[in-house]
Image: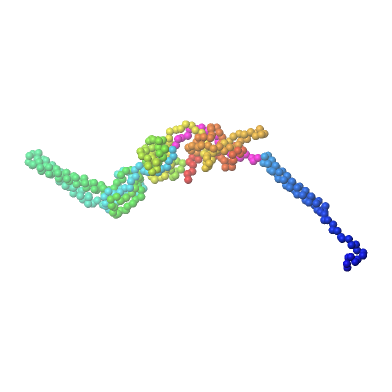
Amino acid sequence: MNIQTESHISGQPIKEKQAKRPVRMVRWFIIVGLLLALLVGALVGFNAFRSHMIAQFFANNKPPPANVSAVEAKTEVIPNLLTAVGDLVAVHQVNVTTDVPGRITEILFTAGSHVKAGTPLVQLFDAPEQGDLANYKAQATVGELQLDRAKQLASRQFGPQSTVDTAQAAYDQAKAGIAKTEALISQKLVRAPFEGDLGVRQVEVGQYLTAGTQIVSLTDLSVLYANLTVTEKQSSQIKVGQAVRVSVDAYPGRTFEGKITTIEPQIATDTRNIRVQATIQNPDSILKPGMFATTTIVLPGKPPVVTIPETAVDYTLYGDSVFLITEKKGDDGKTTLTADRTFVKTGNRVEGRVEILKGLKAGDKVVAVGQIKLQSGMAVAISTDPPPPVPAEPPRY
């Protein structure tokens, strides 16, 4: 069908209408924007409210004060001690040996027994020497008779003086043989050179001994030496006659008294240390040579110093510190106790107490037990329980 030929159809062209955004879509975007704004505002307000409530909770709910034990720093005179390590040696100790070779015929001692000086220990075979001794004694008897006869004849002018001299020489030679043989016989009988305790027996009956063979050890335990070393810097503080306290691991908690008897006049060039020797009485014979000993030299006294228990000091790589207890008043007027970490300079430690050279004064209260749970500025409450006693002998590792 042709439009131009159709009479009932208008011939004017159809015009397209211009597209317009619907009003409903604009309203939708506005509503979504308002909802997002409300949501963001609600989240921001909630976070602000939560932070405020958390801060208010912690401000109004402080943790309770930590329960600690406290001690008071005090001024006292502490012993001036110098500690060193060393070992114990016997004043008299020897390995008993024989001077001459020979075969053992009899053992006259019991291992581990206590013997006096000169006590026979071992008898070696001495039959040849005993025979020589009898021979020389016989010669001495004959020589003495001939000498007396020659002297009587010479006194009456019946004999020459040369006969007297010959008889005198023969008699003296016989006595010299007796003395030499007796010396050899005495060497075959081994005796204790001094009083002491015998050790383990090293020989048996019938054993042939060469000169110098060890028979048994002999030790005098009544007096011991404590050999120790001190540094070159400390050598100026020690003198002969100063008291020394010795402790050993075998008898913890017990000390043995002695005195310095010898100071080495030379300082070792390799270590720059000086050797010191103290003499210790050992009446009970409980100390043994070779024991490791911790020695303490008592030096002249020092002026009074501020001291606190060792448990109150916190030793770290950053320095030594204590928790000093101070009183503080809050906004409500109430007084509270707080523990503030205070660094101190420590000195010597004696019998569980430590010397404070700097950082505290007499009368200051410090925490003695419970530092692990504390932070500087934390509130504390002093326990009514007394602090634990200081052990008499701290453990050694």
Is residue 83 shown left or right of residue 133? right
Q: Which residues are magenta?
A: 61-81
Q: In which quadrant of the rendered view does residue 197 lie? A: top left
Is residue 75 shown left or right of residue 142? right
- For the question of whether residue 351 can be seen, the reply is no
Residue that protrudes farthest toward the right in the picture: 8
Say how the picture is coloured. Answer: rainbow
Residue that protrudes farthest toward the bottom in the picture: 1
Is residue 217 shown left or right of residue 5? left
**Picture residue at 40% right of the left edge, 37% below the top:** 235
Q: In which quadrant of the rendered view does residue 117 lie? A: top left
**Picture residue at 30% right of the left edge, 54% below the top:** 207
| x, y percent for residue 189 | 27, 48
Is 382 contained in the magenta span?
Answer: no
Residue that protrudes farthest toward the left in the picture: 158
Tell me the quarter of the image containing the N terminus. Answer: bottom right
| x, y percent for residue 275 | 38, 40
Is 78 contained in the magenta span?
Answer: yes
Depicted 146 relative to depicted 20: above or below: above
| x, y percent for residue 263 | 37, 38
Is residue 347 shown left or right of residue 15? left
Question: In the depicted view, which residue is nearer to us: 365 or 168?
Answer: 365
**Picture residue at 48% right of the left edge, 37% below the top:** 348
